Image (cartoon, coloured by chain):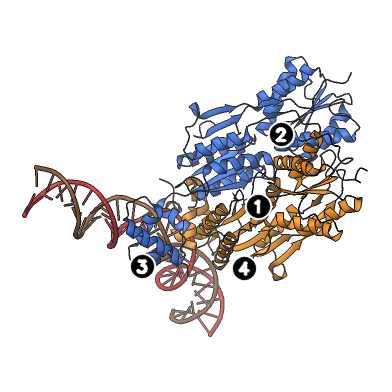
Chain colours: A orange, B blue, C brown, D red
Amino acid sequence: MTVTLADVAARAQVSPATVSRVLNGNYPVAASTRERVLRAVDELDYVLNGPASSLAAATSDLVGILVNDIADPFFGIMASAIQSEIGGPGGRAGGERLAVVCNTGGSPERELTYLTLLQRQRAAAVVLTGGAMENAPHAAAVAAKLRRLSEAGTRVVLCGRPPAPDTGAIALTFDNRGGGRELTEHLIALGHRRLGYIAGPEERTTTRHRLEGHRAALAAHGLDDDGKRTVHGRYDRRSGYEATLELLRREPALTAVVAANDSVALGACAALRDAGLRIPEDVSVAGFDDLPFSVDTVPSLTTVRLPLAEAGARAGRIAMGREEPPPGGIATIRGELMVRGSTGGPRR
Amino acid sequence: MTVTLADVAARAQVSPATVSRVLNGNYPVAASTRERVLRAVDELDYVLNGPASSLAAATSDLVGILVNDIADPFFGIMASAIQSEIGGPGGRAGGERLAVVCNTGGSPERELTYLTLLQRQRAAAVVLTGGAMENAPHAAAVAAKLRRLSEAGTRVVLCGRPPAPDTGAIALTFDNRGGGRELTEHLIALGHRRLGYIAGPEERTTTRHRLEGHRAALAAHGLDDDGKRTVHGRYDRRSGYEATLELLRREPALTAVVAANDSVALGACAALRDAGLRIPEDVSVAGFDDLPFSVDTVPSLTTVRLPLAEAGARAGRIAMGREEPPPGGIATIRGELMVRGSTGGPRR
DNA sequence: CCTCAGATAGAAAGCGCTTGCTGCGACCCT
DNA sequence: AGGGTCGCAGCAAGCGCTTTCTATCTGAGG
């Protein structure tokens, strides 16, 4: 049998109520009593029963972090930052919360199921990271869930995801559109006119916004190609490799490739090299996110830096109620263009 | 007020017991009744109270995954694989478990606190990934915790971590020593005699084992240098960069650098390039793990591939009781030497 | 010396769910 | 037809904790 509060109480010769109060430290207990209780806890190796405690107190110390792909550093970095602010263990006193990250794998159903699971656990807060799916029925379902969660007192924060109106969720949004535009404008300024674009999966806000930025820049310079030079794929290097081959097939005279993110850009570089093209002499390549490895590629990658860790930390603090939400519940976080070796003027 | 089981029962005109049984599906319920209940659940938008359920059933559907650094793909990949087998939502029926990953940040205290938190929640299983700290008191504390967890019925699996004797934990261990030896032997076979080694943080089993493999290979060829050409650092690129500079300072005539992992190797490459050295003509570089980006570096990285995803999946299945533990509760998983462009014969 | 406020500790009523046991028709067998 | 089964539903006893309310004891104030 496991040790219960009552056992501790018996051993310390006090009532269970007192033990509970010592453990929660939210009620005056005489120092001598407290010490006796603590000793008993120690001797019996007592561990509080979480479910029982949550049930009785009608609160929980669980905080959920939803990510699309935990194997992707993009999410890993945000999750790490969020978690470190949530406190988790080792954080500031009192706030000993269990920050858990849930991997949706980009699947709408899993996202929904995880939200339900967290709702079940009466989570204290939920942070959703990364782009949202744009599938209409699903979006509505998620919005409904979020609304219900906030109504139930769970703080909901979106980090790197567009606002969800009328759900009570706080949103820290990345300016993907602006970043995309800036990046493409940089390329156009260098003299590029035939730019390929490797977009992420369809029906994702991140994908759409970055692409819109790109198209906006093209349009501003009369270069819009109606998406002829755009290929969709996943957010991984493999996809970048294949998409680049496809772009090259469609338009052998391409002088620049803009990728949905850095991993994709990496795959693009590999494909270009395998095709015998030099970077950036023959073809320029640009990514997005500025993940840690991007500065070390050869040549180093021109990209848009997103303050992933900062945004995550802020989201975490807001989720913990330790920082004021932005006015209106919405903040837009801008990226910063990082011009590096992978982009240059087009070959003549 | 939130909706409770009783509300649903009233609406469906059945007893709470019946509703519970419908929801858990572990007891015969007439189809018509079930349907009535399900309709009521739907209409009331009822969500089970997790803590109450866990308390009454004395079980929980939480599965904890401990990682040292969630921002590191090494852990992300394993966590992702584990989680996908845990089922999480969307997994096979019945096993709807909440797989949560906890980021210890490599801190012993946090590791311990997370274990306590999971113990509190009466987690169904716990998977610890990656190397363990070798700090003796802490190791003992962790071992004690693990023992207590398994005694309480929590399945404990170690993935990529050395066995913990007498704790009831199943261990899937990576053969870091063997991989390290093989790698260095490859370099020696190429003709290298002055090899630098960038080790990971001290007091980690992974660090020690990889280093031991390296030293064993050196010793086997009479090249042991008593650690003169070994520098310790963190498991990230920055650390690799700095350590390489240090190695170069100590031994400008170095012909090869072996890194603790691929990220470190990346930093090493950057440092060498900045020092005007070519890879592999002037200096060969090798990593460990074979993370996804490693094949795309320029030149592509010679490394030891660890079957992270496979190991994680297996650990996940074992944790779920869906696969037999290996005989003796211990399995050693070997890495595979991947010889690529970053290693070659030494310059004359 | 008595009363009253202040500080602690205890009693007990749940929190919302699960589950062993009981109850009750319907059905089958001899 | 009577007894035994089987299938399905309800009763009620907790699960281990939190928290309100009450009891007790001290010392201060009148």
Label 2 vs label 3, nearer the camera: 3
Q: Hey, what amino acid is under mark 4? A: Gly
Identify the image quadrant of the N terminus of chain A: top left
Query: Badge 3, how many Cα within 10 Å: few under 14, some, many 20+?
Result: some
Q: Mark 3 lies on which chain?
A: B
**Spatial separation of the CA atoms under disc 1 and disc 3:** 41 Å
Nearest to the observer: residue A163 or residue B326: A163
Mark 1 or mark 4, which is nearer the start of the sequence? 1
Residue identified by numbered label 3:
B10
**Spatial separation of the CA atoms under disc 2 and disc 3:** 62 Å
**Spatial separation of the CA atoms under disc 4 and disc 2:** 46 Å
Q: Which residue is drawn at 33% across and 60% down?
A: B33
Residue identified by numbered label 4:
A168
Q: Hey, what amino acid is under mark 2? A: Glu
Q: Hey, what amino acid is under mark 1? A: Gln
Residue B95 percent location from the top left of the image: 47, 46
Circle on res. A83: 1
Quadrant housing residue A153: bottom right
Q: Please state if B56 lies on the left or on the right of B279 as rendered.
A: left
Visible residue check, residue B141: no
**Spatial separation of the CA atoms under disc 4 and disc 1:** 22 Å
Q: Hey, what amino acid is under mark 3? A: Ala
Q: Do the residues labelled 4 and 2 touch (CB within 8 Å)?
A: no
Visible residue check, residue B221: yes
Residue A279 percent location from the top left of the image: 86, 39
Residue identified by numbered label 2:
B202
